[in-house]
Amino acid sequence: MGKMAVIAHGGAGPGPERQENLQKAVDVATELLLAGASAIEAAVEACVVLEDDPVFNAGTGGVFRNDGSVLLDASIQTSDGRIGFVIAMSDTPNPIRVAADLLDENINGLTGLGARKWADNRGHANRPVEGREPIEGDGDTVGVIVRDSSGAMACATSTGGCSHRPPGRVGDVPLPGSGFWVDETRSVAATGEGEDITRALLSYRVSSRVESPQCDSLMDAMRWGLNELIPDGASVGLIALGKDGAGVGLSNTVMPWASWTED
Ligand code: GLY
């Protein structure tokens, strides 16, 4: 069984000064794992740290859509085959908590007003999310992957959506196989131009690539994904974690990422 591990990213695009903020999320996940938490608990709490930090485009720091609204997407998937995702949620500072609450439901995903109504019934925080103007070169998503002491993995992602997009637009983050993919052997999360990531079904195909005879590692698969599946000029990054070993990150632009692996 692999050792416990955490890897997180702060979005394709933001500068290295966000590294310190990202580290806080990895530290929270690490402490929880060391105290016996599950991969799901650690991934969600680390994602909440990033959603609560206004420097990241997720939760509190979600960027305005073209009409000034703040609409948030989040997703979580586990290595035992469960998925939860929410799309275009307003007034929800921590959409990852709502997504996580779907893991044990028959439905996988919820969107818009229905998602908010469902979250109200479950007692999830309902208050305006301040949001902010998009800034040039802004990051677009946060992501955390965790492997716990049982070897189980969970991947949590959250975003305000890429900058300069209309309300109603759906990016890669809530779409299984696009912004995230987890199975019993590995987990992959993407960040960057959601349209390009979705067209490539990037996370699923990078994960599957590891099975190919031409591929010898997760890093090799990520390199293939960025080089062969993503068009020139699109900013995209990936993080990944297997059944053992440390998490790995790769991006064709600046992407702060940080990791921890049990000694
Ligand atoms: N990658 C985040 C988005 O496209 O919304």
Image: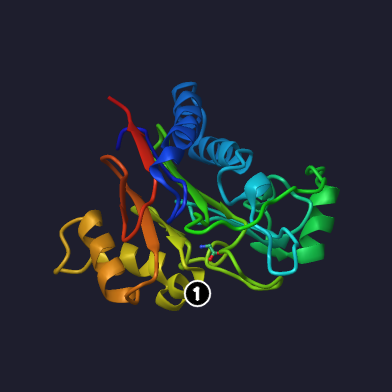
Look at the image and tell me whether residue 54 can be seen. Answer: yes
From the Cβ of disc 1, is ligand 1 less than 8 Å away? yes
How dense is the environment of label 1, judged by Cα within 10 Å: few (below 14), some, or many (20 and up)?
A: some
Give the x, y percent position of residue 90: 77, 57
Look at the image and tell me whether residue 107 can be seen. Answer: no
Residue at x 64%, y 62% (from the top left corner) = 108
Total marks placed: 1
- Locate residue 30: give its quadrant: top left
Quadrant in which the N terminus appears:
top left
Give the x, y percent position of residue 152: 43, 42
Residue at x 46%, y 40% (from the top left corner) = 18
Relative height, residue 34 to residue 187 (above, below)? above
Q: Which of the two residues, 219 or 3, is positioned nearer the viewer here?
A: 219
Give the x, y percent position of residue 176: 51, 66
Task: Indicate left or right for 67 with 237 as reference.
Answer: right
Q: Which of the two residues, 100 or 179, is positioned nearer the viewer here?
A: 179
- Provide the residue designation for mark 1: 195
Quadrant in which the C terminus appears:
top left
